[in-house]
Image: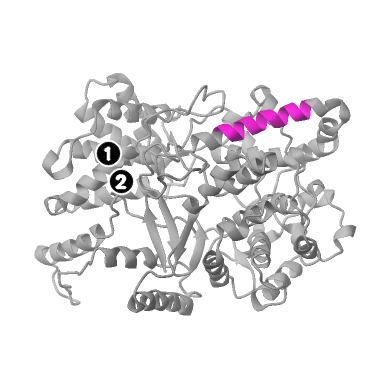
C-alpha cells in the first residue's frame, strides 16, 4: 500500500532543511502495509473513481484520508442531523452539524500541525519529470515499478474520449499535453499501437503532428531528442549577462517566467540533447506526418495548434523572434563570440545554482524542477547538485485514487492558515485546543526567517524574511496572500489565552511579516503576489512567448492578495498602533481604493490587473 509520510528527511545524505523538514510530504510504497480490509477500501475508491471519471474528473484525494483516519482510529461520535424540506433550521441543529464537521476535519490534521492535500490538475506537469529521469538514466531507480504503475493509471484515467489529453484534467484535448503524455506512455513501456497510445497518436497526427506543439513542448522535445533546436525560438543565455541594461531585464519578469527560461536558455545555449536511444529514434517516426529527415525546422517555430492557442502572437513578437534567430544567435554562436557564449553560460549556471541552493533543491515549482535537474546533470552527471535534485523529486509526487500525479508543489502554509481560520470561526475553539496549538506551532515555525543568501538583489530576488511560502519554509519563496493569511492567524492567536492556543509569536516576527507585505504594494494600491510590480511597462506582456497562458511575463497586482493583506494589516494596526503608523495608514487607504476601483460594473473582480 501507499503511505503518506510527514517530515521524512533526517539523516539523508543529499537532503538539507532550514527547519527539520517540517511539513514535508512524501509518498512511499510499502508492500506489507495494510490489512486486507484496508487494501479493499483503496481498491473500491479506485474503482468508484474509474466508473465515474468521465463525469467527475477530480479525484476525492481519499488515500491519505483513509490512512490518517485509520491511524487515529477515528470514529465519528456525533450523529447526523437532518433537516427535512420545509422545516425550520434551529441553532442547536446547525451547531451539531458544525461540530460534527469540525470533529472530522481536525482528525485529518497531521502530527506536524498542517492538513495535507494535493495541489495538481494540469497535465503538462508530470511528463517532463519522466523525460528528465529518462535522459539522466534514473527513470527506473527513482520511479520504481509501483510508481510507474500509478503514473500509467493517472495517464489512462485522464485521457479524453477522443484520445487526447487536455491542458488540465477537465480540459479539451490539446497538442501540448497529448504529445507529452504520449511520449510519457512510450517511455514507461507502452507500445505505440496499444489502445491508449494508438488513440493518442491518431489525435496527434490528425491535428498536424508534433510540429504544432506549443513552444514549451518544442523545447522539451528538443531536449529529449525528438525535435531539432532550430525549430525552437531562440533563448540566448546572453540575456542573463546583459539583462540589466535591456529594456526588459530578468528582475522585471514574473518569477515563474524568469526561472522557467533560465534553465531553458542554458540548455538552448549548449544545444543540449539527450542520448539518441533506439526508442527516441523510433519516436521521431511516430509523432510527425512526414519523415523526420525531411522536416523544415525553422518555420515550425511559429506553428501552434489552434487547440493550444490562448491568444495570437502579435507581429512585433514574431519579428523579434526572427531577428534573434537569423541575426543575433548566429553571431553569438560564431567562433568570434565563443568566449562570450561560454561566459554567458557560466553566468546562467551560477543563477541556476543560486536558486537551487536557496530552495533546498526543490526549485520554485514543478515546471522548473525537471529543467533545473537536466541543467545540473548536463553540467556534471555525478555532481552533488544533481544528486540533491533527485532527493527532492518525491516532494512533488502525490498519490490519489486516480493514480500518481505531479503537484505544482505543496500548499501546506496556505491550507493551514485557512483551516485554522475556519476552526476559529466556529467559536468552538475551546473544544479543539490541541488542534489550534499544533496549527499555531506549524505556522510560527514555517515563517521564513532569512532573506535569500548573499547579494540577493543582484540575483534578481526580493526580500523574503518574515514571509510565508505557499508550501513550507524550505521552499523559501514568499507570497503576499500566504503571508497575510498566516499573519492574520498569529494576530488572532495573540489575543487568545495561551493555554488554549499556545504562546504568541515574537513581536519582531510580526514586524518582519508586515515589512514583507508593505514591500509588495504597488503604486496603484494593489498587492503583487511574489515580487514588486511596475518595474517595466505592461506593454512587454505583448512579448509573452507562452501560447497557452496569458499574463505569464510580468508580475501583476491581484485583488485577492490585496484583500488578504489589508485584513491582516488592519488587525496588526489595532494590536501594534505605533509601529510604522504613517506607512500602514497609507497602505490601508491605497489598498481599499484599489479594491473599489478594480470592481467591475457587474459587481465582480477579475483575476489580476
Q: Residue at x 71, y 57 (%)?
A: 213
Residue 49, above or below 167 = below
Q: Position of residue 250 (x, y in %)?
A: 61, 30
Left or right placement of residue 210 versus residue 355 in this view: right
Q: Position of residue 122 (x, y in %)?
A: 54, 58
Is 520 or 362 nearer to us in this picture?
362
Q: Is residue 603 visible?
A: no
Is 171 or 489 nearer to us in this picture?
489
Q: Position of residue 81 (x, y in %)?
A: 16, 72
In the rendered image, which quarter contains the N terminus? bottom left
> In terms of secondary structure, what is the magenta stretch mainly?
helix
Left or right placement of residue 38 versus residue 194 in this view: left
Where residue 335 sits, quadrant-wise, is top right
Q: Residue at x 21, y 51 (%)?
A: 435
Q: How many residues crowd around disc 2 within 10 Å: few (fewer than 14), some, or many (20 or more)?
A: many
Does the magenta segment cover residue 324?
no
Per the image, the residue denoted by label 1 is: 488
How far apart in space, not on screen, are marks 2 and 1 (Cα)?
Answer: 8 Å
Q: Residue at x 68, y 77 (%)?
A: 194
Magenta part of the protein: which range? 340-354
Is 511 or 405 nearer to us in this picture?
405
Per the image, the residue denoted by label 2 is: 417
Asked whether the beta carbons under mark 2 and mark 1 sit within 8 Å of each other, the answer is: yes
Amino acid at each position: 500500500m501507499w503511505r503518506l509520510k510527514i517530515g521524512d528527511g533526517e539523516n539523508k545524505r543529499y537532503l538539507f532543511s532550514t527547519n527539520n523538514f517540517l511539513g514535508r510530504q512524501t509518498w512511499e510504497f510499502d508492500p506489507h502495509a495494510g490489512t486486507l480490509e484496508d487494501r479493499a477500501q483503496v481498491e473500491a475508491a479506485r474503482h468508484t473513481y474509474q466508473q465515474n471519471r468521465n463525469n467527475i474528473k477530480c479525484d476525492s484525494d481519499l488515500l491519505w484520508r483513509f490512512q490518517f483516519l485509520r491511524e487515529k482510529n477515528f470514529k465519528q461520535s456525533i450523529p447526523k442531523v437532518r433537516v427535512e424540506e420545509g422545516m425550520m433550521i434551529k441553532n442547536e441543529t446547525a451547531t451539531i452539524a458544525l461540530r460534527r464537521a469540525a470533529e472530522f476535519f481536525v482528525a485529518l490534521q497531521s502530527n506536524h500541525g498542517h492538513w495535507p492535500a494535493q495541489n495538481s490538475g494540469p497535465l503538462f506537469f508530470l511528463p517532463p519529470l519522466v523525460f528528465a529521469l529518462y535522459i539522466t538514466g534514473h527513470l527506473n531507480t527513482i520511479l520504481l515499478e509501483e510508481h510507474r504503475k500509478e503514473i500509467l493509471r493517472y495517464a489512462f484515467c485522464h485521457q479524453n474520449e477522443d484520445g487526447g489529453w487536455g491542458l488540465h484534467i477537465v480540459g479539451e484535448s490539446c497538442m501540448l499535453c497529448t504529445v507529452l503524455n504520449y511520449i510519457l506512455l512510450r517511455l514507461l513501456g507502452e507500445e505505440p499501437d496499444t489502445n491508449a497510445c494508438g488513440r493518442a497518436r491518431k489525435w496527434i497526427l490528425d491535428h498536424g503532428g508534433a510540429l504544432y506543439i506549443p513552444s514549451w513542448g518544442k523545447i522539451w522535445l528538443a531536449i529529449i531528442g525528438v525535435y531539432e533546436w532550430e525549430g525552437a525560438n531562440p533563448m540566448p543565455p546572453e540575456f542573463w549577462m546583459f539583462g540589466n541594461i535591456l529594456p526588459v531585464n530578468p528582475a522585471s519578469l514574473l518569477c515563474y517566467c524568469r526561472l522557467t527560461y533560465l534553465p531553458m536558455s542554458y540548455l538552448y545555449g549548449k544545444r543540449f540533447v539527450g542520448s539518441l536511444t533506439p526508442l527516441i529514434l523510433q519516436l521521431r517516426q511516430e509523432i510527425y506526418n512526414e519523415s523526420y529527415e525531411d522536416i523544415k525546422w525553422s518555420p515550425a517555430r511559429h506553428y501552434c495548434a489552434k487547440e493550444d492557442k490562448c491568444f495570437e502572437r502579435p507581429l512585433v513578437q514574431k519579428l523579434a523572434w526572427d531577428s534573434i534567430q537569423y541575426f543575433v544567435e548566429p553571431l553569438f554562436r560564431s567562433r568570434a563570440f565563443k568566449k562570450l557564449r561560454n561566459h554567458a553560460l557560466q553566468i546562467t549556471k551560477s543563477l541556476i545554482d543560486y536558486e537551487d541552493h536557496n530552495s533546498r533543491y526543490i526549485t520554485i515549482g514543478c515546471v522548473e524542477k525537471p529543467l533545473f535537474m537536466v541543467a545540473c546533470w548536463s553540467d556534471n552527471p555525478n555532481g552533488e547538485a544533481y544528486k540533491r535534485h533527485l532527493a527532492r523529486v518525491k516532494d512533488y509526487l502525490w498519490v490519489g485514487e486516480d493514480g500518481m500525479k505531479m503537484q505544482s508543489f505543496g500548499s501546506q502554509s496556505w491550507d493551514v492558515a485557512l483551516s485554522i481560520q475556519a476552526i476559529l470561526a466556529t467559536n468552538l475553539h475551546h473544544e479543539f485546543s490541541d488542534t489550534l496549538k499544533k496549527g499555531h506551532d506549524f505556522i510560527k515555525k514555517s515563517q521564513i526567517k532569512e532573506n535569500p543568501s548573499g547579494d540577493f538583489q543582484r540575483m534578481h530576488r526580493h526580500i523574503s524574511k518574515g514571509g510565508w511560502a505557499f508550501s513550507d519554509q524550505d521552499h523559501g519563496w514568499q507570497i503576499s496572500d500566504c503571508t497575510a493569511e498566516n499573519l492574520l492567524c498569529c494576530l488572532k492567536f495573540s489575543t487568545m489565552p495561551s493555554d488554549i492556543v499556545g504562546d504568541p509569536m515574537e513581536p519582531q516576527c510580526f514586524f518582519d511579516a508586515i515589512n514583507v507585505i508593505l514591500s509588495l504594494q504597488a503604486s496603484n494600491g494593489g498587492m503583487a503576489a511574489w515580487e514588486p510590480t511596475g518595474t517595466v511597462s505592461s506593454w512587454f506582456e505583448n512579448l509573452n512567448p507562452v501560447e497557452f497562458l496569458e499574463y505569464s511575463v510580468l508580475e501583476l497586482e491581484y485583488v485577492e492578495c490585496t484583500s488578504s493583506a489589508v485584513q491582516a494589516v488592519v488587525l496588526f494596526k489595532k494590536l501594534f498602533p505605533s509601529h510604522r503608523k504613517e506607512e500602514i495608514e497609507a497602505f490601508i487607504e491605497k489598498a481599499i481604493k484599489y479594491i473599489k476601483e478594480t470592481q467591475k460594473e457587474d459587481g465582480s473582480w477579475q483575476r489580476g490587473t
